[in-house]
Image (tube, grey):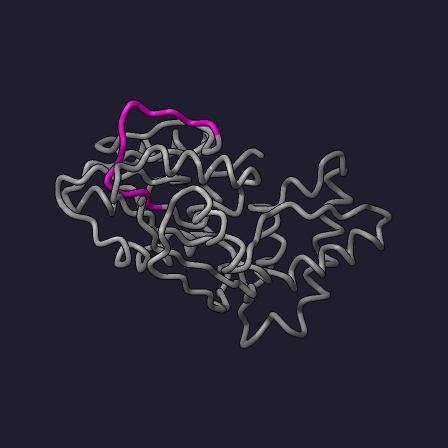
Amino acid sequence: MSWNADLYRDKHAFVFQYGNSLIEWLQPQAGEKILDLGCGTGELTARLAATGAQVTGLDSSASMIAGAQQRFPQAEFVVANAASFSLPEQFDAIFSNAALHWMLDKEAVAARMYQHLRPGGRLVLEMGAQGNVSSLLQALEKAMQQHGRQYRPFWYFPSVGEYTSILEKYGFRIQQAHCFDRATELADPDNAIIEWFEMFGDHFFENVPAAERRAILQQAQEILRPTHFRNGKWYADYVRLRIAAVKQ
């Protein structure tokens, strides 16, 4: 899909802001080589680099990487697919925030992460877990059906057991796994649900004319209003999975 890097930073900065606490799980050290997998617009890549680590940010979106390079020219960024990338070095750690649920070839991604870590290297990740934004997706499905459109699931939101089993299959040893609810405040008090889908849900609307797409999104937002609009603010029902693992 295509990404709007400006909309991402302006209205959905919570994605990388919440990732700041994930850095505490990683405990980066000066001089370490770290890969930021699915780095987006590079804010967390820059935070990692500020610790003195040597950080490479990798993302499949050329527009995201272009924005990252412009804002953080001191960091190294690479456009590549997480399921097939090949870099000439191994890393002391791999860090990934809010990216792995986009990567549907999850076993290939796990294999690549393992390949690019040195023995004893660390993997720290956060991704959407089973049940993530389920109310938003149910509202969208209902609205699409009422417009005669077929809803097709897209993201990969696994359970704790499912994803830790994949990592273990490829040679990781799990140190911590934490699944938790995180109701997430959205920025726009008027059209937050619409903008959320415009930011993240472009894949649901292939071949849907713009006017019909807008009508579907407005309907989905109204379906959610009684439960997701509180005290003048919109919220999304996020469920997150955090894992810390090491390469055996």
**Residue name at image x 34 percent, y 52 percent:** 245
Classify residue 101 as left or right of residue 122: right
Classify residue 196 as left or right of residue 9: right
Classify residue 116 as left or right of residue 163: left
**In which quadrant will I find the C terminus?**
top left
Q: Nearer the viewer, residue 189 or 225?
A: 225
Q: To which quarter of the image does residue 38 belong?
A: top left
Q: Which residues are magenta?
A: 84-95
Please tell me whether residue 124 is drawn above or below residue 76 in the rendered image.
Answer: below
Residue farthest to the top?
A: 88
Please tell me whether residue 174 is drawn above or below residue 112 in the rendered image.
Answer: below
Q: Nearer the viewer, residue 181 or 147?
A: 181
**In which quadrant will I find the N terminus?**
top right
Q: Position of residue 112 (x, y in %)?
A: 41, 34
Q: How many marks?
A: 0
Q: To which quarter of the image does residue 105 belong?
A: top right
Q: Position of residue 210 (x, y in %)?
A: 72, 39
Please tell me whether residue 2 is drawn above or below residue 191 in the rendered image.
Answer: above
Q: Nearer the viewer, residue 217 or 82?
A: 82
Residue farthest to the bottom?
A: 231
**Residue name at image x 56 percent, y 65 percent:** 237
**Residue name at image x 67 percent, y 74 percent:** 226
Q: Position of residue 122 (x, y in %)?
A: 28, 47
Q: Is residue 236 magenta?
A: no
**Residue name at image x 47 percent, y 37 percent:** 109
Q: Position of residue 115 (x, y in %)?
A: 36, 33
